[in-house]
Image (tube, grey):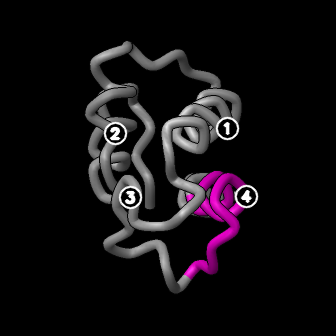
Amino acid sequence: MSSLEMYNNAFKESFGVEEKELEGLEYQGVTNWDSVGHMNLIAALEESFDIMMDTDDIIDFSSYEKGREILAKYGKVIQ
């Protein structure tokens, strides 16, 4: 599975969205991306990519696109 597929699956499973909805998706942009959903997403990403995000990065993780930038800081290029 590619890094992009793992990344997208974390969003789809955490929020129950379709792949076509991911581009431009932002925090609270769908009902399930609330504070609890946010932590579920972070947990899924940390497990999938075998990383532990800093608190500042978890707080800054505000959109699908921003998440890609944050994961790049951990050496995880999403493509």
Q: Disc 2 and disc 4: Cα gap in Å?
A: 17 Å
The residue depicted at 37 percent of the width and 53 percent of the height is 27
Q: Which residue is mark 4?
A: 13
Residue 69 magenta: no
Q: Considering the numbered disc 3 on the image, is that residue within a helix, a strand or a loop?
A: helix
Q: Which residue is mark 1?
A: 44
Side of 27 relative to 30 (left or right): left
Q: Disc 3 and disc 2: Cα gap in Å?
A: 8 Å
Give the mark nearest the N terminus, 4 or 1: 4
The residue depicted at 69 percent of the width and 29 percent of the height is 47
In the rendering, at what x and y percent does residue 28 appear?
40, 57
In the rendering, at what x and y percent does residue 44 appear?
67, 38
The residue depicted at 60 percent of the width and 28 percent of the height is 46
Label 4 packing within 10 angstroms: few (<14), some (14-19), many (20+): few
Q: Which residue is mark 3?
A: 64
In the rendering, at what x and y percent does residue 40 appear?
65, 37
Q: Which mark is residue 61?
A: 2
Hey, what amino acid is under mark 3?
Answer: Tyr
In the rendering, at what x and y percent does residue 48 appear?
68, 37
Label 3 packing within 10 angstroms: few (<14), some (14-19), many (20+): some
Q: Is residue 44 above or below residue 24?
A: above
Along the line of sight, the residue nearer the viewer: 9 or 28: 28
